[in-house]
Amino acid sequence: MRISWMWRAFLGIMLLITACPVSVQAQATSGRSVAAGAGAQLVESSWSGPRMGFMIAPGSGSISRNLEGHGLGSVVSEFGWQIEHRVAPVGGGPQLVTEAVPLLGGVEYGKLVPSITGIMGVRFPSGYEVGMGPSLTVVSETTVNKGLVIAAGKSIDYGSVCIPLNLAVSTNSKGTMVSLMVGYAIHRTGQ
């Protein structure tokens, strides 16, 4: 079986995403405190876990036509993994969050459509969160959708487990896609 450049690139990115956070964030995963000027104390932590949901390409725009042209419908399943790094003030307050979310979609159509999204945002003590960042979806060897993702949702913390529910809108010059995602994330302790 010949592996195309698209799959080699996707597998390389997946390897980097899953390998780097373990080594780079190993110092931060124990929930250690760090000084942040003027005596403020911050706590860093790393979380990760599975994500699943679906993406909708509404209307009959360019993105929807492109998906249909590649044997996909306007509703596509998504399965993947979320890697999250948090920085929060000691004693509570809003958390600064960065996330990488690699996904595979389209299994119900007999296809594998890889995508990756990077999100930077804030999660408030109430659990509500908002963020934005770049997204890349490889529909075929000749079609790569790039866009800006704006996401909002609610995360419910149960000790070392977090259950997020998020709505994301990805937009670019070709149109808009909407995703609804759910999953869980587990606090990763020092390796």
Image: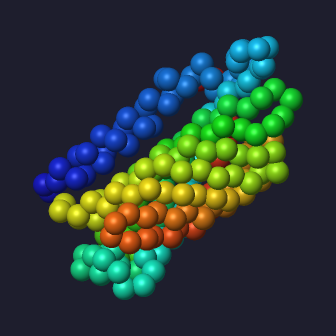
Q: Position of residue 47 (x, y in %)?
A: 63, 39
Residue 29 location in percent, x, y? 64, 26
- Number of numbered callouts drawn: 0
- Residue 75 image-quadrant placement: bottom left
Q: In the displayed structure, does residue 120 sit left or right of residue 1?
A: right
Quarter of the figure with the C terminus: top right
Image position of 39 (left or right of 44): right
In this view, the residue in front, 105 or 99, is 99
Point out the image quarter for the N terminus: bottom left
Name the residue rendered at 54%, 51% in the picture.
132
Q: Which quadrant of the figure has residue 2? A: bottom left
Using the rendered view, name the quadrant where residue 34 is placed.
top right
Name above or below for residue 170 compared with residue 87. Answer: below
User: How is the protein colored in the picture?
Assistant: rainbow
Name the residue at 73% across, 32% down.
Answer: 88
Residue most toward the bottom?
60
For the point 71% across and 46% down, which residue is it?
Answer: 123
Residue at image coords 54%, 57%: 150
Find residue 83 and report its horizontal and vertical position in percent.
54, 42
* Residue 136 visible, this orientation: yes
Residue closer to the observer: 145 or 39? 39
Q: Residue furthest right?
A: 91
Give how far across and how far down residue 69 sits, in percent: 24, 80
Q: In this view, does 13 lie above or below 80?
A: above
Q: Is residue 77 visible?
A: no
